[in-house]
Image: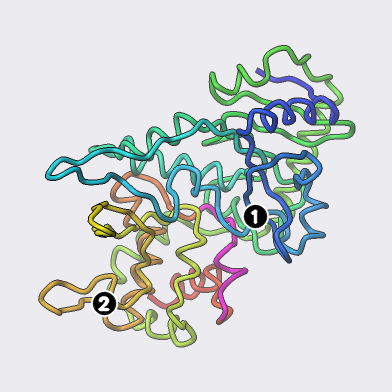
Amino acid sequence: MKVFLKSEDLKKLLEQFAGAGKLFAPVKKGGYSGWARVSSIDEVVLSGAQAVLQGEEVNTRKPAKVFVFPQSEVMFEFDGERAVEVTEVPEVVVFGLRPCDGRAMAFLERFFVENKPEDPLVRERREKATLIGVACNSPAESCFCTAVGGGPHEGKGLDVLLREVNGGFVGEAVTEKGEKVLAGFPAPSKEAEVEAEKRRQEAEGKMALRIDLKRLKEVLDKGFNSPVWERLTLECVNCGACTFLCPTCHCFDITDETVRGKKKRSRVWDSCQFTLYSQHASGHNPRLNPAGRYRNRVMDKFKYTVDMVGELSCVGCGRCVRVCPAGIDIRVAVAEILEGV
């Protein structure tokens, strides 16, 4: 199902969601763009050009995974020996995801829900979230989604994909939920569809990087003990920013707390780049060396999740490239691995 939304039609649609208190979208946050509940449509970053002005290129700093897998959440509280669910999951409409974040949402759903046993909190959050993505017409220098199987106009993982053209957006419903959002809008003109396709080709043409993913997997299958990992981690400061801002990283820790007699169990994001992440109760730590931790991160992206659920867990969003304080670029690392493992 495809429709055409004039820019003013999209604004009215978003105002309905904002009026109901459901709308979350990228907004200006200091020198970058980030997710926030939106009360005024004027706050929303609607186009790539606006995002560039905010200094964060074309994407939010935090990934959209926060809507299905929050950074921290209370799983349940204890009433004596009985666990009581206390988290009420609200319905939300998330506008402005880029296709890389959509692909990441599909991965998280595959990992947490389809890969049994399912995670009920992730499942419920995804069921109550409507994801309206906006295609990238001007990818950032750090973007490489096409090198890992995605694309700047891909709709995977979204409910609706909007492709910006002159005068408005070509909207495509990806799911039944998306069809309900777009119901009532007219079909796009032939000219609008041709323009959208031209912009897709231009956007893809701006990303020249190509990775032989099949060969990379074969190399990693045999590369656990390679000396390349030591070289790649010489600059790493183990801050964990690459994992916390990765849209597919899915590790978490569980903590039990008692505050003024009330007990609760919480889940918080964790990072395989932290020293204590893999420490056993005995005190033994199989990844005490930074090289082992960085190897785990790369292996997870390009080997482990392929073995587990059949999918890469790198979507080429480039966040880790942009935020690494040591300037480590995973694209360069992959090239070195292909040469040196």
User: Considering the numbered disc 2 on the image, is that residue within a helix, a strand or a loop?
Assistant: loop
Q: Secondary structure at mark 1?
A: strand
Residue 301, x across and y down, in percent: 41, 59
* Relative depth, front residue between 267 and 222: 267
Q: Which residue is mark 1?
A: 34
Q: Earlier in the sequence, mark 1 or mark 2?
A: 1
Q: Are marks 1 and 2 in contact (CB under 8 Å)?
A: no
Residue at 52% of width from left, 61% of height from top?
245
Q: Tell me: 188 left or right of 310.
A: right
- Residue at image position (49%, 67%) is 242
The quadrant of the rendering that contains the N terminus is: top right
Q: Which mark is residue 287?
A: 2
Q: Residues within 10 Å of mark 2 (few under 14, many from 20)?
A: many
Name the spot of residue 133 as percent of width and height, x first.
64, 38
Q: Nearer the viewer, residue 337 or 99?
A: 99
Residue 107 drawn in magenta: no
Q: Residue at image x 20%, y 41%?
A: 83
Q: Residue furthest right?
A: 167
Q: CA distance from mark 1 to mark 2?
A: 33 Å
307 over 32 or under it: above or below: above
Q: Amino acid at mark 2?
A: Arg
Q: Position of residue 7 (x, y in %)?
A: 84, 31
Q: To which quarter of the image does residue 13 belong?
A: top right
Give amino acid for label 1: Gly
Q: Residue furthest front?
A: 260
Question: Which region of the structure is painted magenta?
Answer: 315-325
When the figure is inspected, residue 79 is found, relative to residue 174, above or below; the finding is: below
Question: As drawn, is 115 to the left or to the right of 171?
Answer: left
At horizontal 70% and vertical 20% (from top left) the residue drawn is 2
